[in-house]
């Protein structure tokens, strides 16, 4: 069966099931999920969506509906766009005179909006982080610290090194683009905003400490290379500025003056207010993470173990993006991180949980599904099938998953496991996070993953499964 035929039913029906095209304010996808931002959540037909072919699960997070597909989510997304006409900027720009929908201003609603925004801005940059990590891994493995095949002065080592660094150096440009797609801004204006933030002249002013003003307004210049929050905040505010000028600029002048006036207004707003605020936010949150990573002792060990035990729950709620965003800042500043990424062994708890269920199950079809979930996690890096097909279905295995995460995190904390790059996937490649320091660090990363997998499998097997659910 071709990919078009495989997702035909989904593409033909899912938009109607989320309330129709007019109910969608934003539509995109991440590594495994379709993400719909909706105006009216009451119109969603959850059960009907769950029953569609090739849908692994459905989750509501604030105003965003997440439909879990798996690794082929990109193919499903393209087919839905073809069938419905939805695109990543969807209804948010279809009518610039349209007033924004009613916002949920409760603490929960605001929190969900922040997490959804972080997810929408950061998920699309995962491929460049993976590429960066692979190049840095090559320099670590073949460079003087391990195999010593490539000297630091060789052209190949220099090439791989600056190719790996490029993703972090130009992060504001990439985030400017992805944030623009998320907030409905012209993407090239998002790129320009990110480029302004890292222009060498501004960086030079920040380094020299000389006084600088923007239209007479004092500017606390900062070096924004490798930053995330200044670009996200700037493009978010720019979405309102651009909408204003698109609405009130005469049509004959709009192509030239709407984008120019948008950036013109954003220069003082971004460079004097949002940039320093985002820099401050990233700096002090990252310093907290650095403090946690360097604190040592039982507090750090337990903190890592607890984060590892709860990681999959953080993923389900989207809260993990707050940690990942800060980890990117820490990694860009110091080249290593030993708190959040030390808990990445928790991904293997899903595979272990599924193995425990596999050993307990008697039905051949269910055993086959459990085995496929293990492969999906270890090879494909997709944890949702196991999480929803085993964990949330039978409930007890979730305790096994948490026990595995705690045990793996405990070992990671005791051995001071340190990450030297970010490979934001949940499969065996995530172990490359720990390449770059001494060889034992990489070995400890493997051991932590094995412990997490094994403990999750054993505890899940011992707790057993509810036989009533096996017949469902």
Image (cartoon, rainbow, N blue to C red):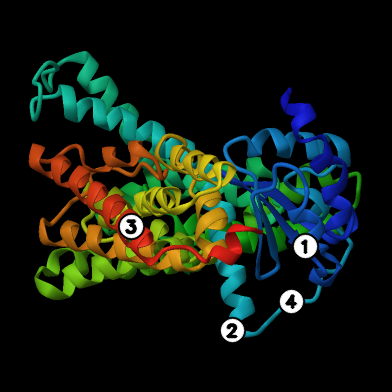
Please state which of the two labelled residues, at mark 1 or mark 3, is closer to the viewer: 3
The quadrant holding residue 170 is top left
Which residue bears the numbered disc 4?
Answer: 103
* Neighbour tally class for label 2: few under 14, some 14-19, many 20 plus, Cα within 10 Å: few
Whether residue 146 is situated above or below residue 111 in the rendered picture? above
The quadrant holding residue 74 is top right
Outermost residue on the bottom side: it is 106
Whether residue 462 is situated above or below residue 373 in the rendered picture? below
Q: Identify which residue, 446 or 115, lies in the foreground.
A: 446
Pinpoint residue 296: horizontal percent, then vertical percent.
10, 68
Labels in figure, total: 4
Sequence-wise, the earlier of marks 1 and 2 is: 1
The quadrant holding residue 247 is bottom right
Say left or right for 211 vs 143: right
Q: Are the residues tagged 1 and 3 within 8 Å (C-beta)?
A: no
Q: Could you say whether the residue bearing mark 2 is in a helix, strand or loop?
A: helix
Q: Which mark is residue 46?
A: 1
Q: Which mark is residue 107?
A: 2
Which residue bears the numbered disc 3?
Answer: 456
Pinpoint residue 41: horizontal percent, then vertical percent.
79, 69
Using the numbered discs, state the Cα–Cα distance from disc 1 to disc 4 in whole angstroms.
22 Å
Sequence-wise, the earlier of marks 4 and 3 is: 4
* Neighbour tally class for label 4: few under 14, some 14-19, many 20 plus, Cα within 10 Å: few
Please state which of the two labelled residues, at mark 4 or mark 3, is closer to the viewer: 3
Residue at position x 21%, y 20% in the image: 157
Q: Identify which residue, 241 or 458, lies in the foreground.
A: 458
Sequence-wise, the earlier of marks 1 and 4 is: 1
Residue at position x 50%, y 60% in the image: 391
Q: Could you say whether the residue bearing mark 3 is in a helix, strand or loop?
A: helix
Say left or right for 99 vs 352: right
Sequence-wise, the earlier of marks 1 and 3 is: 1
Residue at position x 18%, y 57% in the image: 412
């Amino acid at each position: 069966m071709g990919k078009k035929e495989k997702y035909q039913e989904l593409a033909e029906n899912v938009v109607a099931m989320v309330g129709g095209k007019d109910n969608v304010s934003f539509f995109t996808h991440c590594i495994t999920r379709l993400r719909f931002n909706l105006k009216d959540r009451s119109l969603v037909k959850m059960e009907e969506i769950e029953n569609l072919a090739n849908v692994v699960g459905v989750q509501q997070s604030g105003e965003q509906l997440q439909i879990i597909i798996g690794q082929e989510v990109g193919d499903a997304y393209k087919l839905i766009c073809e069938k419905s006409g939805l695109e990543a900027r969807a209804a948010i720009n279809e009518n610039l005179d349209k007033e924004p929908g009613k916002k949920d201003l409760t603490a929960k609603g605001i929190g969900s909006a922040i997490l959804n925004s972080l997810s929408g801005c950061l998920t699309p940059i995962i491929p460049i982080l993976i590429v960066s990590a692979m190049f840095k891994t090559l320099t670590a493995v073949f460079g003087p610290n391990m195999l010593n095949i490539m000297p630091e002065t060789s052209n190949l080592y220099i090439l791989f090194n600056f190719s790996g660094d490029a993703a972090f150096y130009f992060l504001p440009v990439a985030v400017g683009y992805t944030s623009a797609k998320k907030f409905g801004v012209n993407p090239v204006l998002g790129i320009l905003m990110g480029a302004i933030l890292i222009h060498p002249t501004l960086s030079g002013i920040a380094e020299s400490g000389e006084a600088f003003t923007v239209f007479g307004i004092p500017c606390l210049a900062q070096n924004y290379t490798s930053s995330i929050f200044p670009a996200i905040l700037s493009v978010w505010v720019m979405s309102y500025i651009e909408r204003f000028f698109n609405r009130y600029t005469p049509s004959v002048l709009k192509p030239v003056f709407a984008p120019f006036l948008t950036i013109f207004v954003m220069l003082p707003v971004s460079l004097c207010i949002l940039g320093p605020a985002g820099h401050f936010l990233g700096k002090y949150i990252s310093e907290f993470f650095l403090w946690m990573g360097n604190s040592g002792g039982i507090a750090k060990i337990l903190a890592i173990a607890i984060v590892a035990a709860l990681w999959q729950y953080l993923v389900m709620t989207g809260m993990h993006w707050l940690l990942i965003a800060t980890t990117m800042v820490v990694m860009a500043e110091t080249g290593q991180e030993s708190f959040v990424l030390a808990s990445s062994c928790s991904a293997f708890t899903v595979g272990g949980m599924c193995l425990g269920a596999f050993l307990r199950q008697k039905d051949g079809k269910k055993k086959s599904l459990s085995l496929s979930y293990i492969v999906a996690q270890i090879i494909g890096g997709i944890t949702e099938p196991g999480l929803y097909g085993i964990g949330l279905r039978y409930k007890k295995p979730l305790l096994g998953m948490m026990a595995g995460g705690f045990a793996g995190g405990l070992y990671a904390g005791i051995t001071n496991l340190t990450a030297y790059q970010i490979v934001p996937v949940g499969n065996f490649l995530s172990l490359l996070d720990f390449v770059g320091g001494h060889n034992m660090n990489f070995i400890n990363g493997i051991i932590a993953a094995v412990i997490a997998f094994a403990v999750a499998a054993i505890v899940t097997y011992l707790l057993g499964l509810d036989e009533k659910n096996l017949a469902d």
